[in-house]
Image (tube, rainbow, N blue to C red):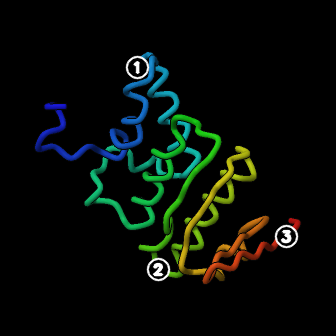
Amino acid sequence: MDHFQGATPTAYGKIELPLMLAPLSRSERRRRADEVANLVRIDHRLKHRPSELSGVEQQRVAIARAIVADPPLLLCDEPIGELDRATSGEGMNILRTLCDELGKTIIMVTHAPRLPLTQTKSTTSIRANSVSQKSRLH
C-alpha cells in the first residue's frame, strides 16, 4: 500500500477503498461509490480530504464507506457520538433511510438512549444484566 503512504485519501478514495479487493472493474467501483455518495448526500464533496469536511460530512463518508459493498447488516458503535444535537438527527435520518429504503439491519450501540427511540422500529436495551425490548410500528 505504498501509494497511500504520506497521502490522505479524498472522500471518494475512502468510499471506494472497500471495493479495491473485490473483483470489480474500475467503472463498477466508480458506479457503486457514486451511488452511495449520492444516497448519503455527500456527492458534492468527494474531492475533499477529511480535514476539509464538517463532522456530519465525515460521518456521511463513513456511512457511505460502510455500505458501498452492500452488506445486509451494519454494526454501528456510537455512530453519532461525535456530532452535536442538530447534526446528530441528520445522521440518524441517514441510518433510518438505510433501513427503510435499502432494507438494512442496523445494530447500534449508543449512550444516548432517547435519540434511537424516536428513530427506530425496535430497541433492545441492556443495562446491569437486564435486557428489555420495545417495538414500535411506523
Q: Picture coordinates of residue 130 (x, y %)?
A: 69, 79
Classed neighbour count for the residue bearing mark 3: other residues with Cα under 10 Å, few (<14), some (14–19), many (≥20): few
Within the image, what quadrant is residue 134 found in?
bottom right
Residue pointed to by mark 2: 84
Could you tell me how far apart the alpha carbons at marks 3 and 2 are, in whole angstroms?
A: 26 Å
Compared to residue 126, the image places residue 62 above or below, namely above
Could you tell me how far apart the alpha carbons at marks 3 and 1 are, in whole angstroms?
A: 42 Å
What residue type is disc 3 on? Arg
Compared to residue 19, the image places residue 97 above or below, namely below
Q: Picture coordinates of residue 85 (x, y %)?
A: 52, 81
Residue pointed to by mark 3: 136
Residue pointed to by mark 1: 26
> What residue appears at the point 38 percent right and 45 percent down from the top-left corner?
46
Q: Picture coordinates of residue 31 (x, y %)?
A: 51, 28
Please report whichever mark, 3 or 1, sits nearer to the chain's N-terminal start. Answer: 1
What residue type is disc 1 on? Arg
Classed neighbour count for the residue bearing mark 1: other residues with Cα under 10 Å, few (<14), some (14–19), many (≥20): few
